[in-house]
Image: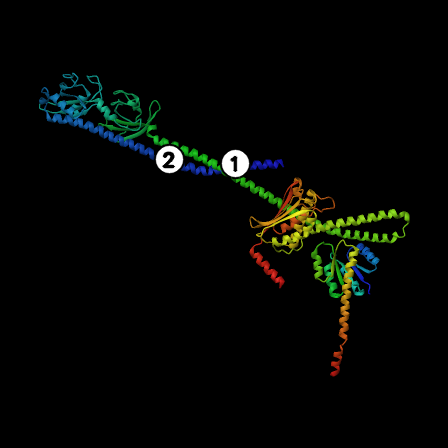
Amino acid sequence: MKKMKIMLVDDEERYLSTTAKLIEKKGYKTLIALSGKEALGKLKTENVHVVILDVKMPGMDGNETLKAIKEQYPLVEVIMLTGHATVDSAVEGLKSGASDYLMKPVDVEDIIEKSLEAFEKRQRLEEKIRVARTKKYMRSPREILKKDDE
Amino acid sequence: MKNTELENRNSRKKLKRIILINMIIVPFLPFVLAIGVSFYNFTTELEKKTTNSLKRIIVDHREMIESFLEERKADLEFIVDTYDFNQIKSPGVMNEILRNLKNRSNAFVDLGVFDARGVHVVYSGQYKLKGKTYAGELWFKKVMTTGCYISDVFLGYRNEPHFVVAVRQESIEGAWVLRATIDTLLFDRLVSKVRMGQTGEAYILNKKGSVQTLKRSDGIRILENDPDFIKFSIPETGIQTFIQSDKLKNEYLYAATWLKEREWLLIVRQGKKDAYRSLYSALNLSLFIMVAGGGVIAALAFYMAERVLKNIDRLGMEKESLGHQLIRATQLAEIGEMSTGFAHEINNPLQIIKSEQTLIEMYLDEISADISIHRLKEMEEIRDSLDQIKLQVGRCSDITRAILKFGRKSETKPQLLSPGKIIPEIMELVNKKAQVNGIEIVSEISKEAPDFMGDPSQFQQVLLNLFNNAIDAVFEKHGSQGGVMTIAAFKGGGNRLEIRISDNGVGIKKEDIDKVFSPFFTTKPVGKGTGLGLSVCYGIIEGFGGTMVVESKEGNGTTFLIELPVCDQNLKEVNNEKDENYAG
């Protein structure tokens, strides 16, 4: 089984480094990005499975980043990390394709739990895609016969 | 504060004075004007009427007296035409004539015949006047020149006031004169026979002011001078009316006219008070109406001023309370905005603290295996400290969450809510907790309770908050049995839905009741409540366009009353359409 790779996106550097350390401790590969732009740059080169994305960031905010990620890397699962203890911003994220949301302040356990859920979802999705692609190239015996008749 | 109160009281007094003055003067001026004008018209008319009636009386009286005198004169002329001088001189004839005359009229006292020299030739009557010479007497001279004469009252030989009528007749033997004395008493009765009020009287003066008939009111006897005469303005012709006072300062209304070819003055007079009696009663009535009307106006003005002031006071109080509400709403909004920003900023450091704490914990777990056995106690201390940090961060995050809820101006989705449906749904959520605490829930939701517009989750938040508070309050008072919580919903006055949530818990202290809706106000122990619950409820209900008030008696329980505007039929339809669209 593939090992999950997480990217944390937030404008608080200390938070990023500490949380990254914590997640790494749990045995998952973790990347960090200080802005949405940086996150998008890193996605180009790294195969990240789950992005933990802060909603409130200077410059490109969480929702914009989410849209950009989903556009360019539709398979990347995004979990919104919201400072607002409101359902509204989370709902907006979910509508734009986020797989889940977390509320600040959040436990590392929660991050990992939700990330794993998202990762499994992505695994299932990749599996389906793989199966679909395989079907496309595999022809059924009937099809082969049909072709032969011609 | 005291100064403002004093100022308020002063300005209230001033206002009252202005209102009073306006309310008294404004109706009083036209009132007085109306009374004055009608009084003037009425009195002028009455004066004219009184004067006219006096004039009519004096004319009638003059005619009566003049015709009496004319008749007497005619009597004598008839005699001198019937008898010649010799015949009349014959014994017994004179007595016969007098008797005949007396039969016709009681006016004659005696009768006498005089020759051209003025010698009394024949006399019939009670005095002994025969043979006396009258040549020097005024009346004789007058009758000899004018042919006919009615004298003033004089004493004459008989030394008693009397007046005479004399006619002259020419004959072959020369001129002779027939003279008759008129009964002064009868004439006096005739003249004084005028009745006007209580003080009305008539009398005759000669042109020198000597009284010819009794002036009874002053007790002036015949031939005495009338003391008032000199002041008279004597009319040339016709009738003169005037007002004059006597020496006792009594005013009289006079009418005067000449009689007997401007030799006698007929006076009719009446006491002014008597003559103008109805005038005075009109004056009194006017005065009474004015005083009474003025009193009524003043009383009404006082009453109205008091009412107006009361209304002003009430409006002022309403304004003040509205002002308070506005200030409160603004304050709430400001606090909300401020604390939201604050809470949001606090969340980030909290997140970091939490992460750091977790990291420390993790490292601690790792190194605990290698730690010296002597350091185990310190390890425990560190662990305890870390737990405490974790706990306090949790507390902080609870607070920031509550603040964010309170301050958030998130989009709400109002929809038509039916109290009969949504309230029991919310009750379901607290039923269990109430049962555990031994609280009986009484639900009195009227079937007529109208629908209202609101966000269901917000409404749920409000009710849950109130229920939880109620449960806490009841538990504090009764422990786990004997608590009652009532929820009632019904159609209130003014097209409003009323929702009443009461409990029989500990109630709210009097000094706290004004603060219950203020943010961060709580009576719960530290760490148990944020003091934002009721503020949030207040804000939500206000957002629904409703009001929320609290009534409480310490030790007896608390009632929260929510009033919400009822959704009207049009809105309902629009809403239904929306729902349909949404469903489609």
* Residue that mark 1 sits on: B17
Residue A81: horizontal and vertical position, in percent? 75, 57
In the depicted view, which residue is nearer to us: B218 or B429? B429
Mark 2 or mark 1, which is nearer the start of the sequence?
A: 1
Residue B206: horizontal and vertical position, in percent? 25, 24
Instruction: Give residue B224's quadrant in the image.
Output: top left
| In the image, residue B578 above or below residue B278 | below
| In the image, residue B92 above or below residue B306 | above
Q: Residue at x 81, y 53 (%)?
A: B358
In the depicted view, which residue is nearer to us: B394 or B244? B394
In the depicted view, which residue is nearer to us: B71 or B311? B311
Disc number placed over residue B575 in the picture, else none = none
Residue B337: horizontal and vertical position, in percent? 69, 50
B485 relative to B193 in the view: left or right: right
Instruction: Classify 10 Å Cα crowding around label 2: few (below 14), some (14-19), many (20 and above).
Output: few
- Circle 1: element type: helix
Residue B85: horizontal and vertical position, in percent? 10, 22
Q: Residue at x 14, y 17 (%)?
A: B130
Instruction: Give residue B5's quadrant in the image.
Output: top right
Going by the numbered disc 2, the residue's amino acid type is Tyr
Going by the numbered disc 1, the residue's amino acid type is Arg
Marked residue chain, label 2? B
Disc number placed over residue B40 in the picture, else none = 2
